[in-house]
Image (cartoon, grey):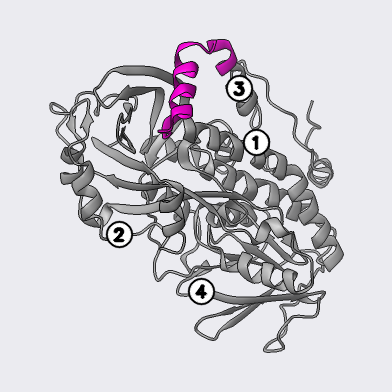
Amino acid sequence: MENIYPSQPPPVCRDGKTPHVMIVGAGIAGLFLAILLDRINVPYEIYERSDEARPLGGIMSLNSNIMPALEQLGVLDDLRKISLPSRDFNIYTSNMEEIGVLGGDDKLFEMSRFYDLLFSRLPAEKIHYKKRVMSIAYNKEGAMIRCSDGTTYHGDILVGADGTYSGVRQSLYKLMQSNGQLPDSDTKALSKCNICMVGTTDPLDPEKYPGISGPTAVLYQMIGEGTPYTWSSMSIPNNQICWSVVKQLGSEESEDERFRNSEWGPESNEAMISEVRDLRIPTGTLGDLIDATPREYISRVFLEDKLFETWHDGRTVLIGDACHKMLPSSGQGAVNAMQDAVILANCIYELKSIAENDVAEAFRDYKEQRYSRAKGQYEASQASAKLLYGQTFFERLLRKFVFNYMPKSIQRMSMVKDLAYRPQASFLPQVPKRGALDVLPQKPSKRYQEEQELAGAPKPI
């Protein structure tokens, strides 16, 4: 594909093996990939479209699917300092009648604090702001991005980590579609089914909100009756509560909203706030939490999802929401984005050279390792959304069956299966298995084994 602009030559790599990586997007996926690349001395630059690092959204959770990789990078101890462990997820009706309890073992924390943690691991000069990608190009010589300010940048690998409405993906698909390479499914719009508003309160009085100062997170989910709303509250460190409210949209409403803003961001939310402020929570009303939340920390988004079939072409590859946007109901979007980063870094580490065919082979390996896993979690997020947000007759029936009749053993089997997948960086010492659950074996790194043998390290048993 001869599409590279001649504005400046691609960077020349001295050893012909180590690529220069351009990461578009300073979200969780892009930052985590950069931290991993830094460990293998792969040069990279991050290009972010906003004018500052401003993570939006509310609460975030991570589980053992990604904890080993965090431990490898020395991030886990700092994560523990900003998070609370969660054990039970209590689910109620809007009249505060208990529906059921879901178990879990996650770390809960405010998203912005995790961003700060990742940013602290990277040199500030590596992140370039106000760089909105307008077009891309790539061929056997290298890859290029052209930004809205007229600047162009070149590298050997281009990673689209720029989220749901990825500019890299849109440009990539435009090029592929013009050549008849893009599947029809990838031309379809994302599915919208819910609208969500989130916020994080200022520190609260523990006497008014029992449990928020305890050693574990307190989680409540309320499911409305005769209303399209479901809402939740979750405690985090510093006596704060992250809250959210989700409105299920009908098909006509979803279509009307299709072309509206779909990014996290402070918006005019007063109409929705008026509708939901009297909804009950165990400690009072949702309005109590809203009033304790600075308006600039309240944002609204349309929940949407899509699993794209095309993840790469030539020297361009996608990770995170750019290739698999999941609903937040199962809390797996960020986990899967970080797993993408781990596996892609492993594949880059194994590169034989920066030749186009070797780069393409690395990307094929990346997708082969990740696609089925992402698909499983994508489907799980849809099922969880029906369970936690659903308001149709069928969804209410499903909820009643799951919480009243489904054997706990089946739920446990599903959890055990999900938690068995724990990818690690193949170029760092492996974190040993902890606990009784089995862990799926990982594709070993021949290069790492050879390097360890040359360094005189003992072979792993």
- Pointer 2: residues within 10 angstroms few (<14), some, or many (20+)? some
Outermost residue on the bottom side: it is 7
Q: State the residue in front, 284 or 44.
A: 284
Q: In the image, residue 428 lies at what x, y percent?
A: 68, 42
- Label 2, on which residue? 266
Q: Earlier in the sequence, mark 4 or mark 2?
A: 4
Q: State the residue in front, 116 or 52.
A: 52
Q: Disc 4 on helix, strand or loop?
A: loop
Q: Which residues are magenta?
A: 387-411
**Disc 4 vs disc 2: which is toward the camera?**
2
Q: Please say whether residue 455 is visible from this viewpoint.
A: yes
What residue type is disc 3 on? Ser
**Disc 4 vs disc 1: which is toward the camera?**
1
Q: Earlier in the sequence, mark 1 or mark 3?
A: 1
Q: Residue at x 34, y 28 (%)?
A: 217
Report, in whole angstroms, how far the alpha carbon at label 4 lies from the one at label 2.
20 Å
Return the mark for residue 394: none
- Label 1, on which residue? 376
Does the CB distance between marks 1 and 2 fall below 8 Å? no
What residue type is disc 4 on? Arg
